[in-house]
Image: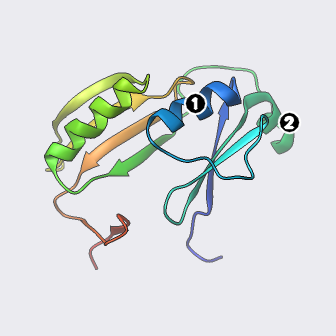
Amino acid sequence: MEPRISVVTLGVQDVGRARAFYERLGWVAAASSNEHVAFFDLGGVVLSLFGRTALADDAGVSAGGAGFSGVALAHNVRDRAAVDRTLAEAKAAGATIVKPAVETFWGGYAGYFSDPDGHLWEIAHNPFWTLDEHGRVKLPA
């Protein structure tokens, strides 16, 4: 298996509401999006928004249960100031700031927001990682 993530799918309560939130962040939904699913090109990875129950049905699992799913998505930025700007943009778009940006134990600077369905996003500056010209993380050798 090649080491790659192609799509991250979030199970959401209301595809239209979730799509509108991500569009308020300035993201553009792909033309193939519709009332049942939305796709966003994240520079080599696709974010898919799909009904939570439909996603569970598709995977053959129960949609029951709530709370922390044990998953957080991360968006790395080039500097500390960009962490604060990005969290402010997310809040203006309707996100809940779960943890304001702080110095991290690993030497970076990061905070968290949740989207309208409670999916966690970490916004981080990691001074030990570089981002290429497209914003993709380059891990040190």
Quarter of the image for residue 127 reads bottom left
- For label 2, the residue is 57
Indicate the amino acid at tag 1: Ala
Q: Describe the element under mark 1 as helix, strand or loop.
A: helix
Quarter of the image for residue 114 reads top left
Residue 116 appears left or right of 100: right
Task: Please name the colour scheme applied to the rendered image.
Answer: rainbow
Position above or below: 19 against 5? above
- Expressed as whole percent of the image width and height from the top left, the position of residue 116 reads 53, 23
Residue 17 appears left or right of 123: right
Residue at 27% x, 46% y is 124
User: Quick one: quadrant of the C terminus?
Assistant: bottom left
Q: For the residue carrying disc 1, how many other residues have a C-alpha within 10 Å: few (<14), some (14-19), or many (20+)?
A: some
Q: Describe the element under mark 2 as helix, strand or loop.
A: helix
User: Quick one: quadrant of the N terminus?
Assistant: bottom right
Residue at 37% x, 31% y is 90
Front one among 40 and 76? 40
Position above or below: 135 against 25? below
- For label 1, the residue is 20
Q: Nearer the viewer, mark 2 or mark 1?
A: 1
Q: CA–CA distance between discs 2 and 1?
A: 24 Å
Q: For the residue carrying disc 2, how many other residues have a C-alpha within 10 Å: few (<14), some (14-19), or many (20+)?
A: few
